[in-house]
Image (cartoon, rainbow, N blue to C red):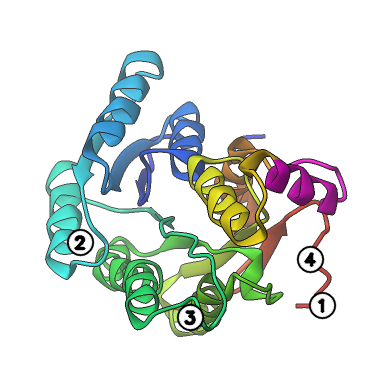
Amino acid sequence: MNLGLQGKVIVISGASKGIGKATALAFAEEGCRLALCARDEHELKLTADFIQMHLKTDVIAVKTNLTRLNDIRRFVSTVIKKFNRIDVLINNAGGAHVGGIVQTTDDDWEQHIQLKLLGYIRMAREVIPHMRKNGGGKIINIIGTVGKEPTPYFMVPGVTNAGLLNFTKSLAKELEPDNITVNAINPGTTDTPLTLETFKSLGALWQKTPEEVRKIIETQSPQNRLALPEEIARATVLFASDALKFINGVSLNIDAGKTLGLL
């Protein structure tokens, strides 16, 4: 199948490792031009260098903190100067704060809301004028299943993810006249460095080792395993492709069917 992505300019946040890195590699394999950003400059450069060396595609990488509007504006400006267009935005960033209401401080709430919720909103707001100028585009928000199915000790990401699901639906409706589609992907627990840090935090709460926590989470999956970053990446590429032009305002769970919610 020709996905129609050759030469498209793909912007990916949180691209230095985990799902973001896997997504960058997947788009590079489709012959896309890439603009990558993340807070970890060293890991981001390693990802960009690997793509340039092995996949021979045009890629730029800019250290960016999504909690800072000026960082986002500087990144988007750099992308436009380099490529003169943006075809697809992949919003992929955030943390995984662990704790219930008592363990969660105002600073915890503020940090997560600034990074993921407002980070996604700000990035979209800066990119949309360029998509309108080009006659259309696609925005894909990598969110998470806890936004649909509240989970104990994941209150902070659950609340921000739920907000992003609402944002996705609302923005999709607003941008219909501009030929810009907005969709979301909700990964289940995925085998990434961030998830490993989450297992450590859960282990401290449950008085278990990270390895024991991993086994518990794996047994809760219908396939008795974690999702792979590449599985999330492949779905993201498909959402960005010409094959799914008629899909707008939806969210796709990639969790082997674990989430039971109807929506």
Q: Label 1 is placed on what type of residue? A: Leu
Q: Name the residue beneath numbered marker 3.
A: 167
Q: Name the residue beneath numbered marker 4.
A: 259
Depth check, mark 4 against mark 3: the one in front is 4
Depth check, mark 2 against mark 4: the one in front is 4
Q: Name the residue beneath numbered marker 1.
A: 262
Q: Are marks 2 and 1 in contact (CB under 8 Å)?
A: no
Q: Earlier in the sequence, mark 3 or mark 1?
A: 3
For label 4, the SS is loop
* Label 4 environment density (alpha carbons within 10 Å; few <14, some 14–19, many ≥20): some
Residue 29 located left or right of residue 13? right
Q: Which residues are magenta?
A: 212-225
Q: Where is the N terminus found, in terms of image quarters? A: top right
**Residue 32 at least partly seen:** yes
Q: Earlier in the sequence, mark 2 or mark 4?
A: 2
* Label 1 environment density (alpha carbons within 10 Å; few <14, some 14–19, many ≥20): few
Q: Are marks 3 and 1 in contact (CB under 8 Å)?
A: no
Q: Is residue 130 above or below residue 86?
A: below
Task: Using the numbered discs, state the Cα–Cα distance from disc 2 to disc 4 in whole angstroms.
Answer: 33 Å
Q: Quadrant of residue 106?
A: bottom left
Q: Give percent across and percent down for residue 35.
A: 29, 43
Residue 9 located left or right of residue 98? left
Q: Name the residue beneath numbered marker 2.
A: 72
Q: Is residue 75 above or below residue 174?
A: above
Q: Label 4 is placed on what type of residue? A: Thr
Q: Main secondary structure of the magenta part?
A: helix
Task: Using the numbered discs, state the Cα–Cα distance from disc 2 to disc 1 in whole angstroms.
Answer: 35 Å
Task: Using the numbered discs, state the Cα–Cα distance from disc 4 to disc 3 in whole angstroms.
Answer: 20 Å
Magenta stretch: includes residue 213: yes
